[in-house]
Image (cartoon, helix red, strand yellow):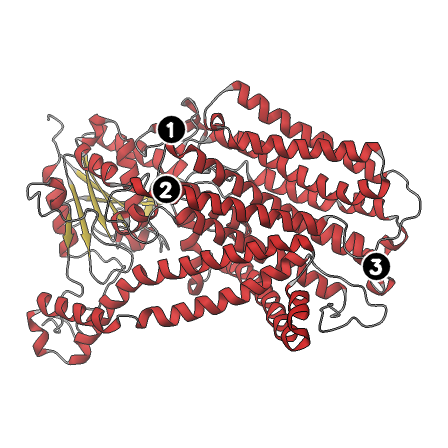
Amino acid sequence: MGITEIRVHGVADKGPETILDRPIVVRVAGDDDAGFYRPRPGFGDPAEPDGATLEAYRWSRLTGGTARRTFSLVLLLPFMLSNIAVWMLPVPGRSGAAARAVCRLLAATMTAMYVLSTVGVSLDLIAWQCAAYPRCLDGRREISWLGGVPPGQRLALLAVLPVIAIAVVWRLGARTWQLPEDSARTPGVGADRLDTPAFWDTRSLLRRLRSVHVAAALGTLNVTLLLALAPHDAALPGWLLLAADVLLLGGAVVLLCRPRIERHGEQDQLSVSTIRWAAVALTALTLGYALTPRPPWSAEGTLPGYGVVVAGLFAGQMVLLAVLGLMVLVQRRHLPRPRFLLTGVGAPVLISVAIGLGVAYSSGLTYGLAEYLDRGSSPTPARPLPPDAPPLAPPIAYRWVTLGFSLAVVVVIVAALLAPRLGRGRRRRAAEDLVRRDYPEASRVPPERTRAVRDAIVHARLADRLGPLLSSAYGVLAVLTLAAAGLSVTGLGPGALALSLGDEPLARPVVFVTDLGALLIGLFALVLAGMGLFAYRSGAIRLVGVLWELATFWPRAAHPLAPPCYVERAVPELTRRVRQLTADGHGVVLSGQSHGSVLIAVTVLQLPDECRRRVALLTYGSPLGSRYRRVFPAYVNDEVLRKLGDQLSWRWINLWRYTDPVAGPVFAPTPALPDDPAARVDRRVRDPKGLLIPPTDTVPPSVQGHGFTPDEDFHSAVRELGGQLDRPDG
């Protein structure tokens, strides 16, 4: 029986030539976005020393590859993170339905924040504040025509910009990587287990969530408009429209909280379609109402009601985050021990990060435009406005957020500097013991060489300490900032509060820190946008591409406007390829590095039983045990991993190194069960291979860390797994 080794790369792919270690390759299946490659005949040996025919599966272009696609991923990053959070909940199924509903509500607030940012730019700053001041319009032909348009009609005309922004994300939410051939199955809405065929098929759920989010987005726009128009007109039509839009938002909340939204049903599809078209109709009526003629009306201050809506959104996010935090703390008790710091509680932390990024985009855009429109005359309690200057001021809630952002930067820098130093001596001594144990020749090499290997081990373990510490510090700070922003509904900003408490000596530093936060947020948003634009062709910032590939692994089950999940194509494609090879009498060794090991593991769970008899699994640099079990405990846990091993009759080898900051053993050691087959899966390999210079080389072996180069340990594992595969005759 022939053996085919299919190598699946991890994040930050460098091409099929590097995966196969062959200079010239040819695609044998798939397309430019994702395909299978083999060495071109006549340009290198198609088989490795272990006798297996080489094949590589490249999927990285599903997540990037073009400037447009990568740039759109940057803009959708807050939506993406809010979607991942639902998969971090500690309990799946009916027991976790309430927590999933809260995650969906928080994801909907991200859509509302997106709409409010466009409303703040087009309606508040331009249509309301700037258009009322000749000094702001002077010399700007693109907006100077607004000076002669009544306020209500100005709002209606510029409301087209938020409508276009909603239409853009509506269109983006319809994207999918699923092939038409994969739609022949009965559409599912996700599932609670990775081995369920419908787990990666969320088309039905996505259609419902997308309709509800579009309705919530249009309802947010309508409410913001009507809060400015209805109190001024004091007429029945305006109040009726406002009441109808509030009921629309309430209906969206109810639909998001209903467990039935996760199940397929024509009645549910009819409900969400109805609310979507009702939102479209109400938007048309609201814009028509805004266009109606009114008596002379002078626009003063900020857009009425807009600051209250923004502050109310932040207050609602704070309450939902607190509720979600309590839920996951209760559910965390059901997780098996040992439990790490963030195991099971990553959902509220990640959603707070998503909110922080959303606020960074919103406030960066708002402050940047305000600075441009008012020509540098931003008002503060400690710096009065020049004569006739327009008081272009973003909502007070944004000033609280910018203050919190400045504090967050300080906290993160301090934590990043202190964390590596805490317990450093103890970690170094433990690493030195490992070096002496692994390398008997350690006493015969220069101390610098030993220290380099020791430090590599110390740095690899640092991620386990630094990540939870920074995430926890940021999460706490984000909640406090949102709480302060929610309190801005009273109309009191940080500068005004400092002025009332300590007069100008206290107000000046507070205003300085707040302005610094606004500058940092704007720079942060610009840097993210620039990184997204150039990440696909710049190796210096490949970290952006790494983030996208990790984040788009999970299906869209909380926020439908997140980038599409590439696994919805990769898993069916891998299963088709494996089934074809095994049907032709081949044995298949699926070998995956880093994130590729997760991809091949979930692929094996989707294979039919007749295929698995001739399939083996080789993982190296795998985060399944060291990362995924901690971050996604409801879906990657001991039960699922043991089922994976059982289905393969434990034809599974996992190679890992102490110097790898990402990977580790998949299974925890169980001394009480010496005959446990899981104990044979994990095999630690030395890194580097030695401390001395080999006789055939001129330099000592380098530390590989998380990198991959096929070596004797790798080829030996492939040979061993190939020998365990069932022959076609059984």
| CB within 8 Å, label 2 to label 3 | no
Which of these two is toward me, 326 or 143? 326
Residue drawn at x 48%, y 54% as measured from the top left: 353
Q: Quadrant of the image for the N terminus? A: top left
Q: Are marks 1 and 2 in contact (CB under 8 Å)?
A: no
Q: Amino acid at mark 2?
A: Val
Name the N-terminal-most of marks 1 and 3.
3
Name the residue that disc number 3 marks: 141
Vertical relation: 439 (above or below) 274: below
Residue 37 pos. (x, y %): 31, 44
Tell me if residue 353 can be seen.
yes
Task: Find numbered disc 3 in the image and state the secondary structure of the residue it sits on.
Answer: helix
Place residue 86 in its image quadrant.
top left
Marks 1,3: beta carbons within 8 A: no
From the top left corner, tell me how far across and down residue 41 is, in percent. 26, 46
* Distance between the alpha carbons at the discs numbered 2 and 3: 59 Å
The residue that disc 1 covers is 198
Q: Name which of mark 1 and mark 2 comes first in the sequence.
A: 1
Residue closer to the observer: 188 or 123:
123
Q: Quadrant of residue 12?
A: bottom left
Q: Which residue is mark 2?
A: 330
Along the viewing direction, whichever of 294 and 456 lies nearer the viewer: 294
- Callout 1 secondary element: helix
Q: Amino acid at mark 1?
A: Ala
Name the mark nearer the viewer: 1 or 2.
2
What's the residue type where badge 3 is placed?
A: Arg
Where residue 591 appears, as percent x and y from the top left, is 23, 45
The answer to whether one can see residue 38 in this image is no
Image quadrant where one finds the C terminus = top left
- Residue 516 to residue 245: above or below: below
Of tags 2 and 3, the one toward the viewer is 2
For marks 1 and 2, give the CA distance.
Answer: 29 Å
